[in-house]
Image (cartoon, helix red, strand yellow):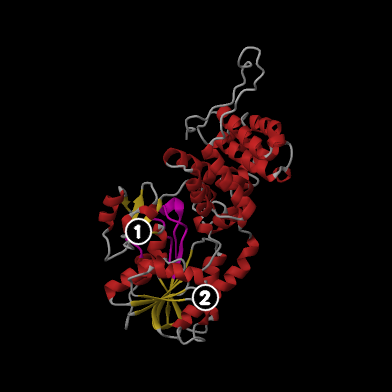
């Protein structure tokens, strides 16, 4: 991406005026780069989420169009490539990046990203970053200039060749540095892909691409072809409700504003709809979304339920997220309960053996959506897994209590980590104390979808399906 107009290196010239000694006037600080810096700094300083802070920063800076797109590219690109950028900056600076003052460190990260991953001319990337450092740490401009000039001495591939361990002796370490993922995540992806390192690399590459925005055209409320025409997009490849948005702010789309559509990854649409596609004997009017916040899947389930004369009970333990579910499901046959889904059988609002279909979209590490949440890959740790998998087992156990005999439970996570997928499902079913049969989930997805594996569970992938890495297991209570 080229730099916005007006971004030029600072030039020194002779004194202006007869006998004058006036110092040259530097151009004002580049606003798109400043916005990107503020977003990256907020992520690291305040544990903020880029997708929440950046829109506010862009609005406060009055950035739109090309400038906003440039700031967005710098922000997300820097956060996705953080691990590799830090390794390069450590080498270029001759000191561990952790020893560089945080304001300077974040500015250098933005500068290094421009040098290695954009078409911004090197002189413009260096000059604008030095100007940025001058505004946040004036005493570090010389240091920043020297580091960035060292970074610019090699391209990205040459840096990887210098710093990454050999693929032959340390494939995980090599892939981690080459594609900017923590080693434990690379290892988890490789395990979930059966040890195929070539496919693991393709997944990591896809994780570093900017993902498209997917819309869900709510069935019975708007046709996806009509929605695609309205937004200038295209119908999804797999979900019958998906529309690919080419650009712009989805929150401004009239169909989203009035509740006929919502933003939702195509994979999330597929796994939610799969529950409703599974054959079911007996009554089919009581559906349960046990972990409903913030409401995307509940919105799709509610629209489908309205077409089939069913009603959805949506449970969300956090009150502010329960309010989001209520907003997302307004005018749909959805009742929202702000309570803990694990209280099935202990609260009369959640009786045992009552529901015909139950969705458990369990809290997880979110490793399947790293392309949408770039900071998550650096915040998550292996130590997060034990409490999360315990919660997942408890929620799935509650779902198996809530569903009637012969009813169906769909267990969903936005993570391909085998501990959160196969291990959790197997253990929860074993501990539930009820008879459980696995339903082959593959026929519940659209015909012709490639790469669904051997069943009975399904794992979707960004590099295979263009979706988040959603996992789906469907269980029938005996």
* Image x and y of residue 242, in percent: 34, 57
Residue 256: which disc? Answer: 1
> What residue appears at the point 32 percent right and 69 percent down from the top-left corner?
303
Task: Describe the element under mark 2 as helix, strand or loop.
Answer: helix
Magenta segment's dominant SS is loop
* Image x and y of residue 102, in percent: 68, 45
Whether residue 184 is visible: no
How much space separates mark 1 and mark 2, taking CA atoms? 31 Å
Within 10 Å of disc 2 (Cα), the crowding (few <14, some 14-19, many 20+) is many
Query: Outermost residue toward the top?
Result: 18
Quarter of image, res 238: bottom left
Quarter of image, res 390: bottom right
From the viewer's perspective, is residue 476 above or below residue 261? Answer: below
Placement of the C terminus among the 4 image quadrants: bottom left
From the viewer's perspective, is residue 70 above or below residue 350? Answer: above
* Image x and y of residue 151, in percent: 63, 33
| Residue 465 highlighted magenta (yes or no) | yes
- Sequence-wise, the earlier of marks 1 and 2 is 1
The residue pinned by badge 2 equals 395
Question: Which portion, as a residue range, is magenta?
Answer: 445-473
Whether residue 71 is visible: yes
């Amino acid at each position: 991406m080229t730099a916005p107009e007006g971004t030029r290196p600072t030039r020194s010239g002779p004194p202006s005026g007869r006998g004058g000694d006036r110092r040259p006037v530097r151009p004002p600080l580049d606003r798109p780069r400043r916005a990107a810096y503020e977003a990256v700094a907020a992520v690291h300083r305040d544990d903020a989420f880029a997708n929440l802070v950046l829109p506010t920063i862009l609005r406060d800076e009055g950035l739109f169009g090309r400038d906003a797109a440039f700031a967005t590219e710098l922000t997300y690109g820097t956060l996705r490539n953080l691990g590799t950028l830090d390794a390069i900056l450590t080498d270029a600076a001759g000191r561990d990046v952790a020893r560089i003052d945080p304001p300077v460190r974040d500015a250098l990260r933005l500068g290094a990203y421009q040098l290695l991953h954009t078409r911004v001319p090197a002189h413009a990337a260096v000059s604008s970053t030095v100007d940025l450092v001058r505004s946040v740490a004036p005493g570090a401009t010389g240091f920043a200039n020297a580091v960035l000039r060292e970074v610019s001495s090699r391209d990205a591939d040459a840096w990887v060749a210098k710093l990454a361990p050999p693929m032959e002796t340390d494939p995980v370490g090599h892939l981690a540095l080459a594609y900017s993922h923590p080693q434990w995540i690379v290892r988890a992806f490789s395990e979930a892909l059966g040890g195929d390192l070539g496919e693991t690399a393709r997944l990591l590459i896809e994780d570093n691409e900017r993902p498209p925005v997917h819309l869900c055209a709510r069935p019975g409320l708007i046709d996806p072809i009509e929605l695609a025409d309205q937004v200038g997009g295209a119908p999804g490849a797999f979900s019958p409700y998906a529309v690919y948005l080419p650009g712009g702010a989805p929150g401004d789309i009239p169909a989203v504003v009035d509740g006929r559509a919502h933003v939702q990854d195509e994979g999330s649409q597929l796994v939610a709809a799969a529950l409703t596609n599974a054959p079911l004997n007996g009554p089919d009017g009581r559906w349960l979304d046990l972990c409903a916040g913030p409401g995307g899947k509940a919105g799709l389930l509610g629209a489908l339920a309205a077409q089939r004369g069913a009603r959805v009970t949506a449970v969300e333990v956090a009150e502010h997220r329960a309010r989001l579910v209520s907003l997302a499901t307004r005018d749909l046959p959805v009742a929202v309960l702000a309570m803990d889904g694990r209280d099935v059988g202990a609260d009369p609002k959640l009786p045992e053996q009552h529901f015909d279909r139950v969705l458990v979209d369990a809290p997880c590490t979110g490793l399947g959506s790293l392309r949408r949440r770039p900071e998550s890959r650096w915040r998550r740790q292996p130590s997060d897994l034990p409490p999360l998998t315990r919660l997942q087992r408890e929620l799935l156990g509650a779902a198996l209590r809530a569903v009637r005999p012969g009813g169906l439970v769909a267990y969903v996570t936005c993570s391909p980590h085998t501990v959160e997928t196969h291990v959790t499902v197997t253990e929860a079913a074993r501990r539930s104390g009820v008879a459980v049969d696995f339903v082959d989930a593959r026929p519940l997805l659209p015909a012709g979808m490639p790469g669904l594996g051997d069943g009975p569970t399904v794992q979707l992938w960004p590099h295979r399906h263009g979706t988040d890495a959603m996992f789906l297991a469907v269980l029938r209570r005996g």
